Image: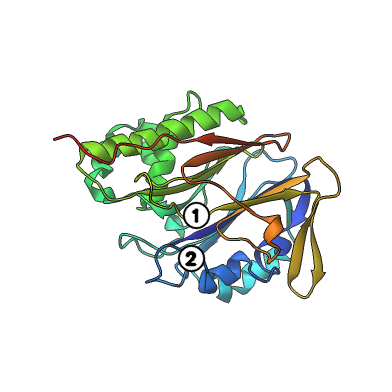
Amino acid sequence: MCRFILYKGQDPILIADLITRPAHSIITQSFDCKLRLDSRRPLNGDGFGLGWYESNDPDPCIFTSVLPAWNNMNLHRLAEKIRSPLLFAHVRASTGGTPASESNCHPWQFGSLMWMHNGHIAEFNKIKRSLQNQLKEEYFLHIQGNTDSEWAFALFLNQLNNTNKLHYTPQELREAMFKTIALIDELSAEAGITASSLLNFAVTDGRTVVCTRYNSSEGEPAASLYYSSGTRFERYGNCRYKMVKADKREHMVVIASEPLTFEEADWLPIPNNHLVVITPKLNVLRYPIPTRPTTVEV
């Protein structure tokens, strides 16, 4: 199962301070993750990706590679030089037999929007054609890879009234995400699929971030997801960091599949089947996601 991390802050952060330097960074999680649900495949070595925004450019820059994240010097070089106020990072463990290719590495982009996913759509091949039939031609033709995650992104785009905008309201992105999850559940129910879909999605337009922690089977745990917020993410020893809260205002928010630090007070778990919105003003809002019925009518 994949791992991801995202950062949104008032000020740009050095990417290395989030993805390479911390003791339990996402690079370490790629070969030593602690909280994955599927313990049969302990490595996330099927590629990685970074996506970030520059201050004066509404479209993200994305760097992907099929090399394992722990074995790519270019990743470490970039991380030591690039600063950004909004960052997505992802290490991949393929599911469903999809190959390791750059087109299958997260995150993906459409205009100003960027998307990544941890989890899987259960028995995706049974609903793939039905999902594709939902899509406008523009989004169908935009797909470059063959992962369920990228098709889910296309389904999300299909829920927006206008994808030519530079920015969207938090409500627009939130409602499109609710509709995307509901449609995946609906298509799965129609196909008679009762297995769990794990839908930890993240999307941003460079200002607002929407992130979900979701398992389609009520009562079963979703893939792990935590958040931390404060004034600054500070290094205080060799590979040791902590989130400093110097005042009541949030200056940054980090969401990650697993905590990056060993300071338990820094991290709060996002509850099962909830959606989190990080607004342009760094307010963190939480909403429950309805779960589909566990029984399927015949």
Numbered disc 2: secondary structure: loop
Q: Marks 2 and 1: in contact by CB < 8 Å?
A: no
Q: Position of residue 188 (x, y in %)?
A: 27, 41
Residue sitting at 56 percent across and 76 percent down?
71
Residue 23: tell me if it is visible. Answer: yes
Foreground residue among 80 and 56: 80
The residue under label 1 is which amino acid type?
His
Could you say which quadrant of the image residue 279 lies in? top right
Residue sitting at 47 percent across and 35 percent down?
177
Q: Position of residue 35 (x, y in %)?
A: 50, 64
Residue 88: tell me if it is visible. Answer: no
Residue sitting at 67 percent across and 71 percent down?
23
Instruction: Using a 10 Å C-alpha cutoff, classify the residue at mark 1 as few (fewer than 14 neighbours), some (14 to 19) or many (20 or more).
Output: many
58 relative to 94 in the view: left or right = right
From the image, tell me which residue sits under label 2.
Answer: 47
Numbered disc 1: secondary structure: loop
The image's colouring method is: rainbow
218 relative to 86 in the view: left or right = left
The residue under label 2 is which amino acid type?
Gly
Quarter of the picture holding the N terminus = bottom left
Quarter of the picture holding the C terminus = top left
Q: Position of residue 246 (x, y in %)?
A: 86, 49
Q: CA distance from mark 1 to mark 2?
A: 9 Å
Determine whether 140 is above or below 199 in the image: above
Foreground residue among 57 and 106: 106
Q: Earlier in the sequence, mark 1 or mark 2?
A: 2
Q: Which mark is residue 106?
A: 1
Foreground residue among 149 and 123: 123
Considering every residue shown, the one lying at the far left of the view is 298
